[in-house]
Amino acid sequence: MSIIQTVDLTKKFDAFVANDKINISVEPQEIKCIVGENGAGKSTLMNMLYGALRPSSGKILIEGKEVVFKSPTDAIRHGIGMVHQHFKLVPSLTVYENILLGSEINKTWKGRKSPFIDRDAEIQRVRDLIEQYHFQIDPLEKVENISVGLCQQVEILKMLYRNVRILILDEPTAVLTPQEVDRLMDNLKELRNNGKTIIVITHKLREVMELSDSVTVIKQGKVIGNVATCETSEQELAQMMVGRDVVLTVSNENGTPCGCEVAYSVKDVCTVNGEQKEILHDISLEVHKGEILGIAGVEGNGQSELIKVLTGLMTVTKGKVTLCGSDVTNAWPDELRKKGLGIIPEDRYAQGLCRDMTIPENCIAGYFGNHEVCKSGVLHGRTIRRLADSYIEKYDIRVADPEGEISQLSGGNAQKVIIARELENHPKVMIACQPTRGVDIGSIEFIHKQLLKFRNEGYSVLLISSELTEIMSLSDRIAVMYKGAIIGEADPSVPVEEIGLLMAGAKVKERTA
């Protein structure tokens, strides 16, 4: 008997049908992957299974019995837990405090519960939980001090503490490094072996093939396929998701040979953190006109700080940055954009979009002074809406309400708003940081082609990505970062292992040997 099943499950938002008679079943101790394009209805479906949304019609069955969830609390009582794409943790609290938040252990006095929390018992309970599931995390560390991968573990442990049998994960690897992805997949397989049933929403087909037992494909709110993973392939899944053959690796041709005109230059750049410790060490690089320069490296080796320095969010303490011959060292983001720098930020919501603004407003964010949308200091609403409509059509941005808030969009569609906005303002140089993070396979292909088209038109791209395959397929040259420094350069045609050695700091060891 299936542990969880849906029967004609439907969700409507006014006239928009997000899920249309969805029928899926998941077996006990199975890892089921749910795949589909952005806006296909995957997250809506999972939110109904978790009680965050109420179905318009249809049924949810657990072990053959119909259940009705009024809230996530109801779902947890029935053994269903969910880890959202954007974590719901309190940074100032410790790991163990986040795990037990809302389910604290109180001290007892003469057999009765007191209002005081039993800190020692909580810490020991979390230590036991961590040991039971073979996680590696310090329960006493504050969440604000741990990596994104460990935050993912905290979210999973929150659900395991509440004894869920079914664990739903929404885009669990969108913000993880390759090493953290591998660790997460090992953890999920271990959970399955310990009796848990796992449902994963993901765009990454390599992970689907490696992790899952079966795959359900959703397109435009409907289930269009359900297959055993061992009986399918990445190419077949991509074709089902998009409805056409998808190029999984783009053809990178027509790049400008090295040695041509320099469009963007970074010379001996250093910066320090809040504790005045140097975190970037004499960074030097050049991006030529008509070239994509990729920056590879294990996440956490200074890429985020480099992007902040180059986009005006951190101060250069030493060195010089030049854009098309103009000194832009420590220029503000607004000035950088006026001089021809496009910015696709690392974190779309922290630096690229405002959740409380509408889609049209976000389409001109950073470009409010453009004469096309602002004349004599007055924004022209109709012009802005027409501009947004053109972006939605050209970049296939799936929206329920074209004038609604950006928060209504899936993560991938929100990312496409940024891509559209930056490319359509025709910068001379584009800094693209994690441009396809959380984006579906069809949109990844589209974004890759757009970046190559931008490059082929004679413009330049500085590409930073934690996806090594993305770096190698798009770049004309690759520079490698390690511990806040550029330690080497490689041609994209070299074996992956050679770049992997650089990413591990092997060249540094050779130099000091």
Image: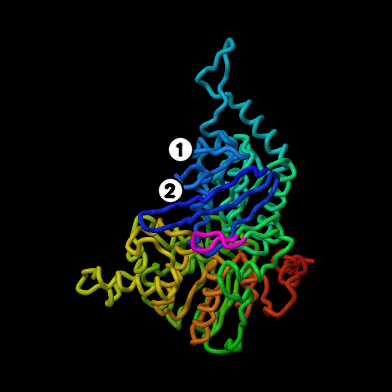
Where's residue 131, x and y in %? 72, 37
Q: Quadrant of the N terminus?
A: top right
Q: Amino acid at mark 1?
A: Lys
Q: Which residues are magenta?
A: 217-225
Q: Is residue 199 magenta?
A: no
- Which residue appears farthest toward the left when viewing the image? 376
Q: CA distance from mark 2 to mark 1?
A: 13 Å
Query: Which residue is nearer to you in this view: 135 or 203?
Result: 203
Which image quadrant for residue 438? bottom right
Name which quarter of the figure residue 133 lies in. top right
Q: Say above or below: 430 vs 365.
A: below
Q: Mark 2 is on which residue type?
A: Ser
- Judging depth in this view, the residue of 150 and 488 nearest the camera is 150
Of 426 and 272, nearer the camera is 426
Residue 337 coordinates in the image, percent (x, y): 39, 73
Task: Quickly name the residue at label 2.
Answer: 56
